[in-house]
Image: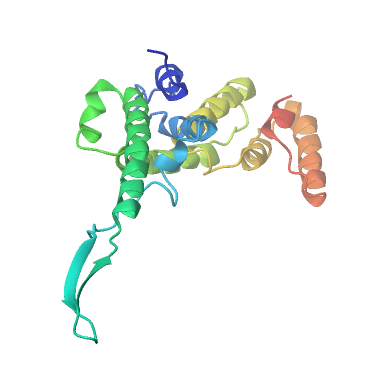
Amino acid sequence: MAQTTEDKNMKTLKLTPIEAKEDGTNNYSEFRQKSMLELDAHSYYEHCDGPKYNPPRIPTLIPTRQETGVDPTGNLVTITIRGNEDVVAAAEQAAEGWSKVDKRVLAIIVRAVPSEKLYVVRDCVTAHEAWIALKNEYEPSNALTAVTIKQQIIGNVCRPGDDPVAWLDLMIQLYAKLRDADQNIMPDSEFASHLVTLMTEDSDWKYCRNELLTKLRNHAARNMPLSSKQVIE
């Protein structure tokens, strides 16, 4: 039997696996962002979230029936009252197709869940339920982690006598962890600003720092925020 496009998608579409790291963080934010794009590219994301994730509604069946009575002339007549069998049949067919796709999407999502976390999605019967279950499992802890890391970045001043290169490496590592926990809590332009304002005031680096501060102000005045790449380079 020839494979359908849906069957091929089911086998080839693999989402970024959710992974826990040794420091207690995880890559759920990365999983979520990439999965949204991957699933949407195959028209699957609507099964996870949004206004279309619910299955088609099947109306209550009203059977066609016949009623017998007497007309105004006294004659016995039988009339047929049409039911909604056709509407119900069409809705059931649509629901069957929706359910088949939804099961595929659910399986694709579950494949990305680590074995020790399968209990989170064990009782989910739709892709939307699994999507929300993972969100509820990972987002609260990630939010707390992100706030903690953000505070570490903001408080990590490169003081006179510190090694600026080692300080910069640490800042880059912290920001990478922050992005893993929450990609939106600190935009790159804000991180760039922290790199400049928290930079050492040692005389050897004074010219570099002052030049970057000037560049930071000029970019802000033109509403073109400085990027961290521009600062690091």
> Residue drawn 44% across and 18% down?
8
Who is closer to the viewer here, 63 or 58?
A: 63
Which quadrant of the rendered structure holds the C terminus?
Answer: top right
> Residue drawn 70% across and 35% down?
227
Who is closer to the viewer here, 167 or 50?
A: 50
Report x, y in % for residue 64.
24, 60
Which quadrant of the rendered structure holds the N terminus?
Answer: top left
Q: Is residue 147 rendered to the left or right of residue 63?
A: right
Report x, y in % for residue 68.
17, 72
Instruction: Say if 65 sits above or below 37 in the image.
Output: below
Q: Is residue 202 rendered to the left or right of residue 64?
A: right
The residue lying furthest to the bottom in this view is 72
Report x, y in % for residue 107.
32, 27
The residue lying furthest to the top in this view is 1
Where, by quadrant of the figure, is residue 166 drawn?
top right
Where, by quadrant of the figure, is residue 59 drawn?
bottom left
Which coloring applies here? Answer: rainbow
Where, by quadrant of the figure, is residue 74 drawn?
bottom left
Q: Is residue 138 visible?
A: no
Who is closer to the viewer here, 145 or 12?
A: 12
Q: Is residue 96 visible?
A: yes
> Residue drawn 40% across and 41% down?
47
Count of labels in the image:
0
Report x, y in % for residue 40.
51, 35
